[in-house]
Image: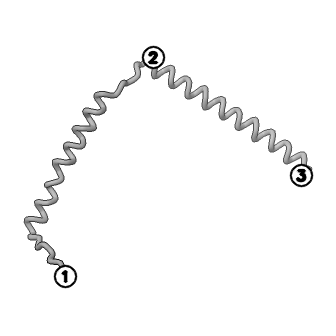
């Protein structure tokens, strides 16, 4: 059974694009309101967190280097190169 398709005029199609524009502004307003609720860290907390991240990354990098060097030594010993 055929279903009748709604005829869309040139002006109607053009104006339909602007109906959703208000939803976009509403979305950004809601995002802004949620950002106001966020508990932002103080400068001192941020420096401590940054230091913890740098130290953690350094420790993990050192561990990976030790494991890589050890495995390289073992493989070179086994393969005799």
Mark 1–mark 3 distance (CA, rounded to whole Å): 75 Å
Report crowding for label 3: few under 14, some 14 to 19, many 20 or more residues within 10 A (C-alpha). few
Q: Secondary structure at mark 3?
A: helix
Q: Secondary structure at mark 2?
A: helix
The image quadrant where one finds the N terminus is bottom left
State the residue at coordinates (70%, 37%). 64
Picture disc at residue 76: none
Name of the residue lying farthest toward the bottom: 1
Q: Quadrant of residue 38?
A: top left
Of residue 1 and residue 38, the one placed in the foreground of this image is 1
State the residue at coordinates (13%, 60%). 16
Q: Position of residue 25 (x, y in %)?
A: 19, 44
Report crowding for label 1: few under 14, some 14 to 19, many 20 or more residues within 10 A (C-alpha). few
- State the colouring used for the structure image: one colour
Q: Position of residue 71 (x, y in %)?
A: 80, 43
State the residue at coordinates (56%, 24%). 52
Give the mark nearest the N terminus, 1 or 2.
1
Residue pointed to by mark 1: 2
Q: Secondary structure at mark 1?
A: loop
Mark 1–mark 2 distance (CA, rounded to whole Å): 69 Å
Q: Quadrant of residue 56?
A: top right
Residue pointed to by mark 3: 79
Q: Position of residue 9 (x, y in %)?
A: 9, 70
Give the mark nearest the N terminus, 1 or 3.
1
Horizontal side, residue 68 vs residue 18: left or right: right
Residue pointed to by mark 2: 44
Name of the residue lying farthest toward the front: 1
State the residue at coordinates (16%, 59%). 17
Give the mark nearest the N terminus, 2 or 3.
2
Of residue 80 and residue 40, the one placed in the foreground of this image is 40
Report crowding for label 2: few under 14, some 14 to 19, many 20 or more residues within 10 A (C-alpha). few
């Amino acid at each position: 059974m055929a279903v009748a398709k709604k005829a869309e005029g040139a002006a109607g199609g053009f104006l339909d694009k602007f109906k959703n524009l208000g939803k976009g502004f509403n979305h950004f307003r809601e995002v802004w309101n949620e950002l106001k609720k966020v508990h932002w860290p103080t400068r001192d907390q941020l420096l401590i967190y940054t230091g913890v991240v740098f130290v953690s990354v350094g420790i993990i990098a050192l561990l990976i280097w030790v494991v890589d060097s050890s495995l390289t030594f073992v493989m070179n010993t086994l393969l005799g190169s």
